[in-house]
Image (cartoon, rainbow, N blue to C red):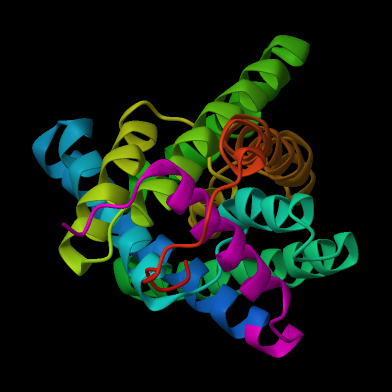
Amino acid sequence: MDSLKPPAIVSAMIQAGATKAALSPGDLLVRGMLSGALLGIATSLAVGAAVQTGQLLVGALIFPVGFVMIVLLGLELVTGSFALLPMAVMAGQAKPAQMLTNWSWVLLGNLIGSVIYAILFVIAVTNAWQVAPVGVADRIRALAEAKTIGYAAFGGAGMLTCVVKAILCNWMVCMGVVMGLASTSTIGRIVGAWMPILIFFAQGFEHTVVNMFIIPAGMMMGAKVSLFSWVAWNLVPVTLGNLVGGFTFVALAFYVTYARKGAELPSALPQET
C-alpha cells in the first residue's frame, strides 16, 4: 500500500517545511520563478479550454496540471508555503525568520515568473500587439478587470468578498499539498493533488499567483486596470487571504489534531513539495 496515514502526512509536511526553510535565496527565487510561469501556463490553458467549450468545469479539470508539476518537481509556490513553513516553525524545525525569508523570496520569484510568461503569452496571442485580443485573450482581459475594478465597484463589500474568496482558495490549495503527500507513488500524488485544485478553480476563488499572470496579461492587452488597482484590490488582499486560509484551515488545524499527538516520521517520505 502506498497510502500514508494522516499523522505521517503531517510529519511529512513538517519535514518539507523544514527543507524549504533551509533553501538559499537563489534557489527560492529560481524555483519560485518556475512555479509562477508553470501556473501561468496552466491558467491560460484552462481559460482557453473554458472559452472554447463554454464550460468552466472543463478548464477546472485541466488547470491542476500546473500545480501537479510544481509538486512533483519540488518547486516553490508561496501559497503552499503558507501551510508548510508555519508547521515547521510550530514543530521547532524552522525559525520564524526563515519562514519570512522563504515567503519573501518565493513571492518575488512567483511574481517574476508569472509576469515573464504573461509577456510571452500576450506576444503570442496578439502577434506582438498587432491584433486585438480575441477568444482566450479577451477573456483574460475581462478577468483582469473583474478581479480588480470589479471588486472596487462594491467598496468594502467587494474587499470582503475578495478576501473571503482568497481564504477559500488557499484552503483548497494547501489541501492539494496535503493530498500530494498522502501517497508514496507518483500516480497517487498526482490524483491526490489534483482534486482540491479542481475545486478552487471551478468555483472562481482567488489565488494570488494565478492573478500575477491574469492581471498583468490583461493590463498589457488593454484592461482598464491601474497598477494601484491591482495592488490594492487584488495583490495585497488576496495574498493576505491566502495566508489566512492556508495557515488557519490547514497548518494550524492539522498540527493541533495530529502533530501534537506524537506523529512519527514515516520510513519513506514522498519528495518535498
Residue drawn at (32%, 62%) of the image: 68
Picture quadrant of residue 96: bottom right
Q: For residue 5: magenta?
A: yes
Residue drawn at (72%, 51%) of the image: 86
Q: Position of residue 32 (x, y in %)?
A: 58, 73
Which residues are drawn in magenta? Answer: 1-27
Q: Position of residue 164 (x, y in %)?
A: 62, 21
Q: Position of residue 170 (x, y in %)?
A: 54, 39
- Towards the viewer: 232 or 75: 75
- Towards the viewer: 242 or 46: 242
Residue drawn at (45%, 36%) of the image: 172
- Towards the viewer: 121 or 242: 242
Residue drawn at (55%, 25%) of the image: 165
Q: Is residue 206 visible?
A: no
Picture quadrant of residue 250: top right
Picture quadrant of residue 266: bottom left
Q: For residue 12: magenta?
A: yes
The quadrant in which the N terminus is found is: bottom left
Q: Position of residue 264 (x, y in %)?
A: 52, 56
